[in-house]
Image: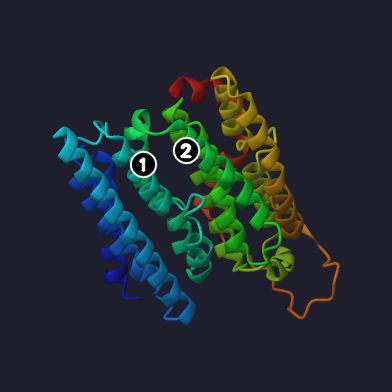
């Protein structure tokens, strides 16, 4: 892709995100979401592979439908209340339509079908953008409207997302699909606590972005796309694979790593709100995703494949260390002792 075109699309992504998160008028927020969608589509389809083109078309159709629903929701609210302010979402039908639209944009169950397919058809860096940057504007809209949303609906979608994200990731061999189902599962954790503590949802999203960024950039360095290539990547970058293992365990939410912090805080918040049953269910469902994280961690550091592989071992490369990966990996594993400071910021 032409560097100038790539720069234009990247700047458009930043512009769309900034417009949405800084707006308090529904039309401005919708405009930012549309700019985002149109900017990411060329980045998805830049390889011109049939799977990439298919992913771009699927992404466009789903996002267009979600944006239409969002605009329809805001128009119904404006018709009944005379308000175009995002925080004044008072009509129940508008609230239901908005929840549906944002669930489609994020990939929450039952509107998740497009997300694993789109991620599988995208390059690793674009998949990273889809998993992190592209989810920020919809989550900021949820943050602004959290007081108007239906708690039962959100809790149901959240538990379903945690269950399906863990269940569907078990039998996958493609790493991008595994990370897509991981994202769906994490969105369940963010959604269940949204109404009770919106700032905790944002903090969970930030920590998720740090861990996912470290994993995608590490995989991009070793060019690992499926488990069979991940098994032999230790010969190329042994130290990076060790830090990748730690980051994957952190994403699974194991103490004493960073990923344990948001899960601990969410379960604590749900217990305070007398929601012991949903907290227990979602904690048990996280064991499903723990299995495939452990499998990924095992494959990333394995030194001898258990089965004969047709893939050739990769040469060790003495490249200079990537500072960004080092920083993100450190933050993904070492932030738990700083939890009092993080709690103070929340």
Quarter of the image with the C terminus is: top left
Q: Please determine whether, in this image, residue 191 is positioned above or below residue 137.
A: above
Q: Please determine whether, in this image, residue 127 is positioned above or below residue 53.
A: above
Residue 101 located left or right of residue 268: left
Residue 304 rendering spot, x and y as whole percentages: 84, 66
Colour style of the rendered protein structure? rainbow
- Spatial CA distance of label 2 from label 1 is 9 Å
Residue, x 63% and y 34% (percent of image)? 260
Residue 331 rendering spot, x and y as whole percentages: 56, 39
Residue, x 70% and y 37% (percent of image)? 284
The answer to whether residue 14 of the structure is visible from this angle is no
Residue 335 figure quarter: top right
Residue 213 rendering spot, x and y as whole percentages: 51, 51
The residue that label 2 is drawn on is 153
Q: Residues within 10 Å of mark 2 (few under 14, many from 20)?
A: few
Number of the label disc, if any, that sits on residue 23: none
Residue, x 41% and y 53% (percent of image)? 104
- Between 293 and 245, the residue placed more toward the observer is 293
Q: Please determine whether, in this image, residue 23 is positioned above or below residue 305.
A: above
Residue 74 located left or right of residue 245: left
Residue 245 located left or right of residue 150: right
Kindly check if marks 2 and 1 are in contact, taking CB atoms under 8 A apart as contact: yes
Quarter of the image with the N terminus is: bottom left
Q: Residues within 10 Å of mark 1 (few under 14, many from 20)?
A: some
Q: Secondary structure at mark 2?
A: helix
Q: Secondary structure at mark 1?
A: helix
Extreme-left residue of the structure: 82
- Between 40 and 58, the residue placed more toward the observer is 58
Residue 213 located left or right of residue 56: right
The residue that label 1 is drawn on is 96
Specify which label sits upstream in the sequence, 2 or 1.
1
Residue 115 rendering spot, x and y as whole percentages: 49, 60
């Amino acid at each position: 892709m032409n560097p100038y075109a790539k720069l234009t699309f990247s700047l458009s992504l930043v512009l769309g995100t900034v417009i949405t998160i800084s707006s308090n008028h529904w039309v401005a927020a919708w405009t930012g979401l549309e700019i985002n969608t149109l900017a990411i589509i060329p980045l998805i389809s830049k390889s011109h592979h049939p799977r990439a083109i298919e992913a771009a078309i699927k992404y466009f159709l789903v996002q267009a439908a979600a944006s239409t629903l969002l605009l329809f929701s805001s128009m119904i609210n404006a018709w009944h209340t005379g308000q175009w302010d995002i925080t004044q979402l008072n009509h129940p039908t508008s609230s239901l339509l908005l929840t549906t639209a944002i669930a489609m944009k994020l990939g929450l169950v039952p509107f998740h079908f497009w997300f694993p397919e789109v991620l599988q058809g995208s390059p690793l860096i674009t998949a990273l953008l889809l998993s992190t940057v592209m989810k920020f504007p919809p989550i900021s809209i949820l943050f602004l409207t959290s007081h108007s949303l239906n708690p039962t609906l959100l809790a149901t979608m959240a538990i379903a997302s945690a269950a399906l994200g863990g269940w569907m990731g078990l039998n996958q061999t493609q790493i991008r699909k595994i990370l897509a189902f991981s994202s769906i599962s994490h969105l369940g954790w963010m959604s269940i606590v949204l109404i009770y503590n919106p700032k905790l949802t944002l903090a969970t999203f930030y920590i998720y972005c740090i861990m996912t960024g470290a994993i995608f950039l590490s995989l991009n360095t070793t060019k690992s796309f499926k488990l069979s290539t991940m098994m032999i990547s230790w010969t190329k970058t042994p130290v990076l694979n060790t830090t990748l293992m730690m980051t994957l365990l952190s994403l699974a939410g194991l103490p004493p790593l960073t990923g344990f912090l948001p899960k601990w805080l969410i379960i604590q918040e749900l217990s305070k709100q007398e929601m012991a049953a949903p907290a227990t269910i979602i904690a048990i469902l996280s064991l499903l995703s723990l299995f495939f994280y452990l499998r990924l961690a095992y494959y990333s550091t394995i030194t001898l494949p258990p089965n004969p592989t047709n893939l050739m071992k990769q040469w060790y490369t003495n490249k200079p260390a990537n500072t960004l990966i080092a920083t993100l990996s450190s933050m993904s594993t070492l932030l738990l002792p700083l939890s009092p400071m993080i709690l103070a910021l929340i």
